[in-house]
Image (cartoon, helix red, strand yellow):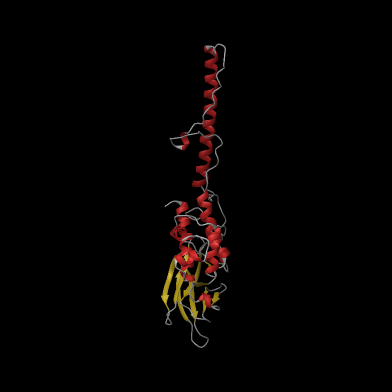
Amino acid sequence: MSGARQEFVLLATELRALRERAALSITELAGKSAYSRSSWHRYLGGTVLPPWLAVRALCQLADEPTPRVRALWELAEAAASGRGAVREAPVTAAPAESTGPADTAVAPVQQPAAPEAGPGPRPHEQRRWSARALAVTCVLALCVALALAAALQRVRTPEAASPDAATPSASGFHVGCVAGACTGRDPGVTLCGAEPQTLLHRLTPSGAGLEVRYNPLCRAVWARVWNTRLGDTLTLSEPGQPTQSIAVHSTHQLNAFVYTPLLGLRAGRTPLTACLSETPHTPATCYRLTAH
């Protein structure tokens, strides 16, 4: 799967979740926006990059704040346009047409125009021009090879970074934080919510679903619930760290995932506790696990 395709799938997955939250069929979605049913089929299927105005319209219909979805859209747009985070260095000399590998391409040398009249060049002038053309061609080929070698070296050998610096994912984009720098931040805005691992999946006695999720690039965890009720409170804690929590305070959260801010992990095995407090007079349902 290409990098661009991966970004399209991430965006399309989020768009499908928003459509389901808004409880709209594709026909209804087309009727409430400026885009046709066939266009929405392509956007939701991840085969075509939707325009931002279409994405924004769906966010408004699903009552979803735009910053997190805007970040996913910008990743997909950058991958589609070739402006991804990892790119080869520009090569100034390139052939008009090339059927071989890029590192063997040789830039063409423009031949001088033949004179309209008069005798042709003498044999020694032809030899001098051929030598000059060969030298220019060799220099240009060497420049191309050096530029490509430098680009490959940058891709294969990433620059050293501090432990809390942003880290690139396998698909080329950068997450917004690492470890302790993530604590208290939004999983979507930092892109830590892309392709996470699920450390815990439980169904609470009241029927709510609860998960603890982890992104190894960010070295951070967060908890989320669904099928909630007004007044429910979700917390995620680690000894010695600030507890991260979120409360269900509006009706539009009842049919959506509700998730805590991130909690950055320290080195080694980390004990975690996720709790869902469903009513003020009922003991919280808590689950304990260890992340590492």
The residue closer to the viewer here, 40 or 274, is: 40
The residue closer to the viewer here, 166 or 94, is: 94
Q: How many marks?
A: 0
Residue that protrudes farthest toward the bottom in the picture: 281
Q: Quick check: 258 above or below 132? A: below
The residue closer to the viewer here, 251 or 139, is: 251
Q: Quick check: 237 above or below 219? A: below
Q: Position of residue 240 (x, y in %)?
A: 56, 73
Q: Position of residue 268 (x, y in %)?
A: 48, 65
Q: Quick check: 31 above or below 173? A: below
Q: Position of residue 269 (x, y in %)?
A: 47, 68
| Left or right of residue 185: residue 23 | left
The residue closer to the viewer here, 234 or 79, is: 79
Q: Is residue 143 visible?
A: yes
The residue at the point 55 percent across, 58 percent down is 52
The residue at the point 50 percent across, 46 percent down is 155
Q: Is residue 187 visible?
A: no
Residue that protrudes farthest toward the front in the picture: 31
Residue 118 lies in quadrant: top right
Q: Position of residue 184 (x, y in %)?
A: 58, 69
